[in-house]
Image (cartoon, helix red, strand yellow):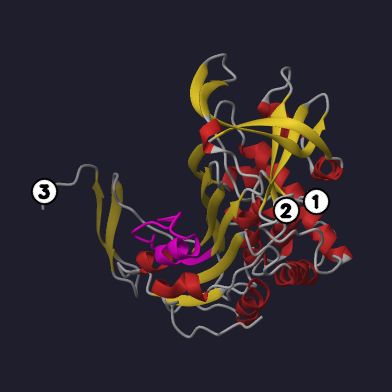
Amino acid sequence: MTRPEPPHPPDLAHAAALRPRFSIPGTLLLLATAGCGLLPTDPSPREITRLPRALSAAEVEVIGASNGFAFGLLAQASRPGENLFLSPLSASMALGMTMNGAAGETWNQMRDVLGFDGLAEEEINAAYESLLELLVGLDPSVETAVGNSVWTRQGFPVHTDFLAAVRETFDAEVAELDFASPSASGRINGWVKAATNGRIEDIVPAVIPGDVVMYLINAIYFKGPWTFRFNRSDTRNAPFYLDDGSTQTVPLMTMRRDLPYRENGRFRAVDLPYGGGAFAMTILVPQPDVSVDDLAASLDATQWQDLTASFRETDMEVFLPRFRMAYERKLNDDLAALGMVDAFGHRADLSRLSPVGGLWISSVKQKSWVDVNEEGTEAAAATVVSVVESAPPAVRADRPFLFFIRERLSGTILFAGKVASPPSG
């Protein structure tokens, strides 16, 4: 993999063409997407039945860890009656880059929350890098792109080891910008828009806050045609039954064929493959006495592995709503609840990122978008980690105060006063 050293901010007009395209494990890409062993009967896409090589033990461990993080994040973010769409991989990649600048308990907490407990940083980075390289072009009929970038405030010192790590492992583009310039946010947002094929916009504010010194960003784009497409003429308006007992009318897509299926006392599950079958959407519908939020809270990586290994080809009908959804979420509280606490406050240790002290993470924000229709699925997500430096001590005389005029060398006070209500000047 070639890694050009960008001496200048990336050319945003051509960013999408410049970014490498990576195929990645389906279980890591989208919360409802999983690798699939189905052999399609449609001869048009190339059938994908196995990886080009066996995964190493470390790679298997990293995939399991990442899936564990996915279900932990799902359980924390899920709210009754609210839609949800996240990319755990995007969050993990953005935080994984940041973790290369963390130290001490901050690093430990980030590693544990991301599910990498017991792995050294070198193992984590090497496994991410090799997985991305391994799966390039796995399914030519499915478009999957991953981009990483690091944007620093002009003049802000950054350790060379940190920059080398994010470039080497995450193939990140690194650029220094004048954050005070009105064009800075436009350049960053333009990179994200290009990397997500126009689906994610305005990930950073139009006016970058004065305390922000770095943005670490991951962007993911996915576009896959169903292996077995729904016939648009079979789509009918039908009721969708909400948890509160009410209904809404939705366009319900329909098909009948042999598909991977699994049922137990808590859910019914089906795998809908994309392209040649390396990627799939896995749908879990709770049984009538189980709420979708309880189901989300009960899942973990082990159950997921058992589920995906136990699908059996079954002649069945599938009814799936056609939908499009945009979603945005600040992940600070979710990550803190999972155990990543220190990074969000003044106890943060980001000393491997910069020689400047007092750095911490002010925000981990994700924006995502998905469109599911009769032809297939298009999805995108971007996650931005905002690193800020502690504000200098401030004296804000906006309430009653005392003041003194003194001679500093001898210490003599010449005048003393109190302002309880400022007279007009």
x, y percent for residue 316: 74, 31
- Residue under the point 66% across and 63% down: 96
- Residue under the point 62% across and 65% down: 98
Q: Quadrant of residue 186?
A: bottom left
Q: Is residue 115 visible?
A: no
Numbered disc 1: secondary structure: loop
Please check the rendered image and state whether residue 107 is part of the magenta-colored stretch, yes or no. no
Residue picked out by circle 3: 424
The residues tagged by marks 1 and 2 sit, at their Cα atoms, a distance apart of 7 Å
- Residue under the point 53% across and 22% down: 238
Quarter of the picture containing the N terminus is bottom right
Q: Residues within 10 Å of mark 3 (few under 14, many from 20)?
A: few
Residue segment shown in magenta = 189-216
The residues tagged by marks 3 and 2 sit, at their Cα atoms, a distance apart of 75 Å
- Residue under the point 60% across and 19% down: 243
Type of amino acid under label 1: Gly
